[in-house]
Amino acid sequence: MGFWTNKIHHTALDDAEDLACAPSGGRLKMWLLGVGFAFLPIAHGVHCLRTGHARFCGDNDSKLDLQGSAAIALAVAFLAVGVFIHAHWFWGLHPRLEPFSGLLKVITALVFLGSFSCADVLDDPMTIREIPPFTRRKIPPSYQGRQPPPPK
């Protein structure tokens, strides 16, 4: 179940199934993925919590701009992803923390599902707006929920 190995006929479902098991690797992988890689979504989630503003990127360069309580819910989802990564690769490779890794992964998965669905429920026009692709300017609050005027 190596992370960097190339497996023939290995699907995304197999990768998701591998997250349920304990990871393989040593101290380098434990610190690189369990701390370094986990820091990225955690730092982004903390930033979103502090500003009250979150952006969720989707397909075809579409971006969803969230504010208020929907942004806080999405920030909690980002934090849950970071803690899940930390629980899998750091706690899963640490000899004393490994027995608790599975429990923490289940808790973070439940927090992620709850907060992500809460961000979807809080999608009233005052807290969410679609940003058209290739738009690099701020949309004034008076245009929330409507299409902004074309750039000059």
Image (tube, grey):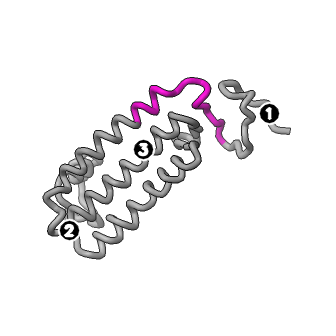
Q: Position of residue 108 (x, y in %)?
A: 30, 46
Identified at 13% across, 58% down, the residue is 99
Q: Earlier in the sequence, mark 3 or mark 1?
A: 3
Q: Position of residue 145 (x, y in %)?
A: 65, 25
Instruction: Tell me the tag on residue 94.
Output: 2
Q: In which quarter of the view is residue 129 placed?
A: top right
Residue 58 or 124: which is nearer the viewer?
124
The magenta stretch spans which residues? 116-133
Q: Which residue is mark 1?
A: 150
Q: Is residue 51 left or right of residue 83?
A: right
Amino acid found under the numbered disc labelled 1: Pro
Q: Which residue is mark 3?
A: 76
Amino acid found under the numbered disc labelled 2: His
CA distance for labels 3 and 2 = 25 Å
Identified at 23% across, 51% down, the residue is 104
For the residues labelled 2 and 1, say whether their Cβ atoms are less than 8 Å apart.
Answer: no
Mark nearest the camera among 3 and 1 is 3
Amino acid found under the numbered disc labelled 3: Val
Disc 1 crowd, CA 10 A, few/some/many (<14, 14-19, 20+): few
Q: Is residue 57 left or right of residue 149?
A: left
Image quarter in which the C terminus is found? top right
Mark nearest the camera among 2 and 1 is 2
Disc 3 crowd, CA 10 A, few/some/many (<14, 14-19, 20+): many
Q: Position of residue 3 (x, y in %)?
A: 27, 63
Helix, strand or loop for disc 2: loop
Helix, strand or loop for disc 1: loop
Instruction: Tell me the tag on residue 43.
Output: none
Disc 2 crowd, CA 10 A, few/some/many (<14, 14-19, 20+): some
Work out whether 113 lies above or below 8: above
121 in the magenta segment: yes
CA distance for labels 3 and 1 = 34 Å
